[in-house]
Structure formats: C-alpha cells, structure tokens
Image: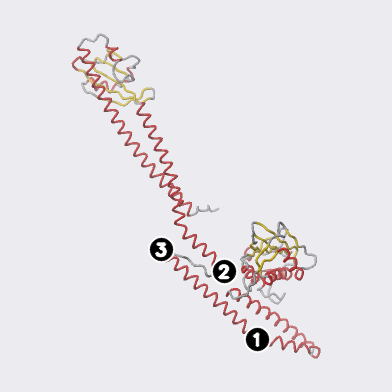
Amino acid sequence: MRRRRAGLRKRLIVLFAVGGLVLSASVAVISYELSRKYLLRQRRTSLEQQAFVNARLVRNRIRAGEPDIVALLASLSPRSSSHYLLDGEQWTAVSPGADTAAVPGTLRAAVNQNHAGHQLVRVDGAPMLAVGVPIAEVGQSYFAVYTLNHLDNTLEVLGNSLVAAAAITTLLGAAAGWWASKRVLKPLADVSDAAALVASGRLDARLEAGNDQDLARVATSFNQMTVALQARIQRDARFASAVSHELRLPLSTLVASIEVVGARRQELSEPARQAVDLLAAEVAHLRRVVEDLLEISRLEAGVADVALEEVHLAEFVRHALRSTNPAGVPVEFEGDVDGAVVRADKRRLERVLSNLVANAERHAGGVTRVAVERENGRARICVEDAGPGVPPEEREQIFERFVRGRAAGRRGADGGSGLGLSLVSEHVRVHDGRVWVEDRAGGGARFVVELPVLP
C-alpha cells in the first residue's frame, strides 16, 4: 500500500523545526567549542603563571635553606593542587596526598631538558593540568598538577544551556512554521472555500486578491473562470428552458388532439385504438419530461419561485406520505425530530419525497422503510428500498439528468425519464441541503436527504 504523504502545512512546520534545530545546533556547537577553547586557554595561562610564581618561591626558599620543603609545597597556591620537586629521576619532595603518577613522563622528560611545559591529563576520570618548570639554580624541577573540575562544571552548565536553547529554538521554529504555513496557506484555503461554493452551486463566489500582487493573478484567473462557468451554465439553462418552452405549445396541441381522438376511441378499430393508446402514453411521458426540464432549468438559472417557510419536519413527512406512501410501509421517527423545524418550500420538498418513493416503486421493488432522523443540527429523511442497491461507481451519476442506474433499465420499460433524481438533487440544493445514496443494512439502497435544522 502506498504511503500517504504528509500535508503541506505539516511539511512546512517540520521544515521550519528542522531548520531551527540545525541552525541552533550549529550555533551551539560552535559557541561551545569557542567558549571551551577560550576558557581553557585562560585557565591554562593563569595556572602557568601561578606555577612560575610557585617555582620562584621554591627556589628562593631553597636558597635561603628552608628546612621543611614538604610543608613549603603544602603551603603553595592553590591549596587544591598537588606540588612536586624532582631531581633528575628522583622525587625529592611531594606535597601531602599527591601521587607522582599524575605527572606524565613526557612532561618530566621535557622539563629535565630545561624546557617549561604543560600537559592535560585525567586522574581518576577528573580533568587535570600538569605544569612543569625547571629550576636550574638549585638543580631541581618543579611540577604542579591543577584540578580543572571548576572549568569542567562551567562547560557542563554551558553545554546544558546551549542544548536547552537549541530545543527552545526548535520549538520556536516549529511555531514560526505553523504561523508561516497559516499565512501562506490562507490563500489556498480561500481558493478551496470558493471552489467548494462554486461546486455547491454558488456561481457568484469570487476571490479577493487584496494588495498581494502574487495572488492577484490567481484571483483574477479564478474569477474569470467562475464568470465563464456561470455564463455557460446560464446559457445552457436558458437554452433548455427555451427549448422546453417551445415544446409546450405543440405538446398542448398533441394532448388536445389525442383527447379528441380518445373521445371517439370506440369508433376506431383495434389496431387504431392500440396506436392511440401508445401515442397517448408517449405524449404524456414527453409532457412530463418537458415539465421536469423546465423546472430544472429554472432552478439552475436561479429564476425559480421558491417559497421558504418554517416547517415542522415530522408533521410534514406524515402528511406528505399519506398520498405517496404505499400501504404497510413503516414510517419511523428517531431522536428529537418532533421539535425539528426547517426552512422549506413545501411543494418542492413534497416533490422530493414523491420522487424518491416513485423511484423505489419503479426500480427497486418498493419502499421498505421511511425514517426521519436528527443529528448534530441536521435532519435526515431516509427512504429505504428492497432493490439490489446502487453500485458505488453510480451513486453520484444517478443524480444527473437522463442518467439511469443498471437496475432502471431503458426508457419505455417503466415510464421513467431519468429526471426524477436530478430534480430531487436540485430541490434539495435549494434548501441548502444534500442528498446521497448508500447501502441499506440487510440489502437494498438507502436514499438520504439532509436538511439544516433551525436553532
């Protein structure tokens, strides 16, 4: 299965967060290294200076005949360090508690060659700085091992602070990414909302570009597209309305003529009577098609008379189904539907119910159940049938004009025109609702009309 790609907003937030992390981590590493080198250099310089001072003091005391060299070493600064005197390869004095193994051999060798030096070492895991100073006047070498725990603690605090700063910067980067994505994607959201309005039939939806020159082209193109689409749909609707209107006069003439011929039906031969009956059925069918086309064209052109009023849905469905509901079909009301009030055109909503019931009777073996439900501020009228159901690939197409599902067959078998569900869709759209078909539990189809409920 193909892995679903993350959304644009999420990718922008991750990009900003990763960018903040990389930037802050780089700054933290560079800052830490520079600070470490600087502090170490400062500390080393200070300790080297202290070692030279101590070496001069030891030299002067030895020249003056200091009797207790060990006590002298113990009194040298800083007290936390260890001090040593070396004569060639022989340690002549060591401060109390000091370990001669702390002085590395390479440093001893360098100092024995009359070169002062220093070396970083670790004693029991603790960082130390060993400094050696030759005292040629007395034939001795002075060594001191200074602890760097204070510097190590300082660097640890600095490192933790930089890590915390990097984490905060990463969070700030993610927040900046969220804010930037919101600003950047807002025009896309506006385009999406406008496109949704156009798709729902609001062809007057337009985009406002504001002062953004980059968005002006997108808004202009979108608005030009909707204007062209609106003009084309209105032109098609006017054409259908004009054609249907022009057909009404000859149809009226045909209906009147057939009624005249039908009044003298008994005087005709059997083949002539069959021809008259067939012609009457076809003319009646054509008349219904023309009337339905006229109604659809008016709705699409926005010139249909829609009389909206507050309607108690449960009571309305009870009355409407008295003339359309076959005997024995249950009508059920679920939830708090008795108090559900909708704004509806009674004539059009009744036409919706009658078309759905007629569709079930004509193509799906009849209605098995009609239910009125209420959920989350929406009311639903559900018409269930006993047919084979509607395949998923046909569930949107059957609401288009002159489209019939597989179960409907061809025109002539049942008198259907393919406009009934299209009229249902148009009438429901006028009520700011929606209609769809789904599978019924136990088999069959379930047509659902959803309408907004007044608060």
Q: Secondary structure at mark 1?
A: helix
- Residue sitting nearer the eye, 172 or 279: 172
Of the numbered discs 3 and 1, the one sitting upstream in the chain is 3
Residue placed under numbered mark 1 in the picture: 249
What numbered label is drawn on residue 211? 3
Q: Amino acid at mark 2?
A: Gly
In the rendered image, residue 183, in percent from the top left (x then y), is placed at 45, 56
Q: Secondary structure at mark 3?
A: loop
Q: Splitting the image into 4 quarters, where does residue 423 fall? A: bottom right
**In this rendering, the label closer to the viewer, 3 or 2:** 3
Of the numbered discs 1 and 2, the one sitting upstream in the chain is 2
Residue at the extreme bottom of the image, as rendered = 267
Q: Residues within 10 Å of mark 3 (few under 14, many from 20)?
A: few
In this view, 454 is above or below 260: above
In the rendered image, residue 39, in percent from the top left (x then y), is placed at 31, 32
Residue placed under numbered mark 2 in the picture: 201
- Residue under the image location 35 percent in, 25 percent down: 122
Q: Splitting the image into 4 quarters, where does residue 24 fall? A: top left
Q: Amino acid at mark 1?
A: Leu
Q: Which quadrant of the rendered structure holds the C terminus?
A: bottom right
